[in-house]
Image (cartoon, grey):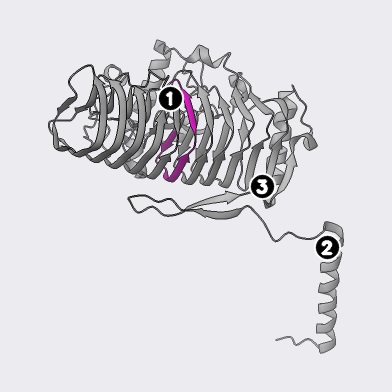
Amino acid sequence: MRIYHPSCRQYLKLLLLFSMLFSLFINGPVSAQTGPVLKKVAVRTPFNMPAILNPDFSGCASFPITDYGAVAGDKEKNAAAIAKAISLASVKGGNVIIPPGEWQCKKIHLKSNVNLHISEGATLVFSADPADYLPAVFTSWEGLECYNYSPLIYAFEVENVAITGKGEIRADMEYWRKWFPRPPQHMASIKRLYNWAQDGVPPAKRNMVNDSSNLRPHFIQFNRCSKVLLQDLKIRNSPFWTVHLYLCKDVVVRGLDIRAHGHNNDGIDPEMSQNILVENCVFDQGDDAIAIKSGRNPEGWHLKTPSRNIVIRNCLVKEGHQLVAIGSELSGGIENVLIENCQVAPENDKLMHLMFIKTNERMGGFVKNIIMRNVKAGKLHEGVLGIDTDVLYQWRSLVPTVTRRLTPIEGISLENISADSAKFLTRINGNEALPIQKVSLTGVSLKNAAEQRLQNKFINGFVVR
């Protein structure tokens, strides 16, 4: 073993000290913070839900896109500037700033430790050219994994990530709306995707970008991400589902104002995601305000990740199909959902149900422990609660049942709910081979029912208090 002389050791210490001082002089002080601070968001629920870990970027550096070549009206320069700012911000954690003004852009791919901040007075306008969302990325379409056009804002396998600010993000729909219809070529493509999933073809080989599939991308998709924050921004228009949380964990969605009236324009879709808080949001949708999902058929069965521990509170629905839909893609299972203190705008007379649980004989999965309380509505197009175990949409005639798996549904509770008018209070269409179990209504009122109030079949343990 080599033994250094004391004078050598002293020399080495001085050399190390000099090196540190020289680095400090050249690079400036090293911040102790290497990313956003993680805070715990505790949510009180009737079920056991852990605190949600969520990023706080208030102490992180700012990276204005104008420092990296952004020019109003130039989507190419803006896309390059945003990508460069994201890469720099991700090193130690930072806020990528979209300043006031209107900024044309292409796809945005987020990285860990980055907050995309849309300043008040800023509008980020996303191109309607499908070519701007290539190359294809690993995503999903209605519960089936595939490679498709990139979501307009996309994050894959990242953590400590956010989109915040009082500004606006908007999708230019000039081209996407042409894809709303479902012509024969489109139907053939989704049939092929469905069969690929049934046959076990790996998602890497399911490329859906061609001249006829026309599978519209999501506006925002967090795919396999954790510790996610979405706060305050306005979202206008969307090619497909607006905010898709896919296989995510620890997510807070707070204060969003979403208006999107295109085809399949759900507001928020948590899918196979856990520990989610959605609060103080406004929904004005062409489809469901919130739709909780967990994969279609084999995708949900082999990923084995239920949507679990989801709280939706203090939200307003201006327009939409359902306040909350459960399914129909739910093959991975859905449990522990609390919807409370929400309201449907009095002028909204198009909402179908406050809660609609939908599945079919091909889904499998499970639904249990779903609680809705303290919700007010005026006129409902259908009813307060709908449960249907035979919802197949286009798939009924498109493909046959390959594997029959029924969905056990148990523990649905509605408390302190009021609506002025609807066709019915509950319409529950259970499955004779697997009846629904334990549905309770406590303090649920419907002033005027156009039809029979309770239209239920194949259910055990239905209680009205």
Compute the Cα span from label 3 to label 1: 40 Å
**Nearer-N-terminus badge (2/1):** 2
- Residue 244 in the image, given as x and y percentages of width and height: 47, 34
**Nearer-N-terminus badge (3/2):** 2
Q: Is residue 354 left or right of residue 438?
A: right
- How crowded pointer 3 is (Cα within 10 Å; few <14, some 14-19, many 20+) is rated as many
Quick check: is 389 in the magenta stretch? no
- How crowded pointer 2 is (Cα within 10 Å; few <14, some 14-19, many 20+) is rated as few
Residue flagged by tag 2: what amino acid is it?
Leu
Q: Is residue 365 left or right of residue 351?
A: left
Q: Is residue 160 above or below residue 393?
A: below
Tell which of 156 and 193 is nearer to you: 156
- Residue 83 in the image, given as x and y percentages of width and height: 69, 36
- Where, quadrant-wise, is the C terminus in this rendering? top left
Residue at 81% across / 88% down in the picture?
5
Residue flagged by tag 3: what amino acid is it?
Ser
Residue flagged by tag 1: what amino acid is it?
Ala
Disc number lying in front (3 or 1):
1
The region drawn magenta spans 269-286
Disc number lying in front (2 or 1):
1
Q: Residue 409 lies in what quarter of the image? A: top left
Q: Secondary structure at mark 3?
A: helix
Q: Secondary structure at mark 2?
A: helix
- Residue 298 in the image, given as x and y percentages of width and height: 32, 36
Q: Residue 132 lies in what quarter of the image? A: top right
Quick check: is 272 in the magenta stretch? yes
From the image, give the main secondary structure of the stretch colored magenta. strand
Residue at 74% across / 35% down in the picture?
65
Residue at 21% across / 32% down in the picture?
404
Q: What residue would you read off at disc 3?
A: 90
Q: What residue would you read off at disc 1?
A: 345
Question: CB of mark 3 within 8 Å of CB of mark 2?
Answer: no
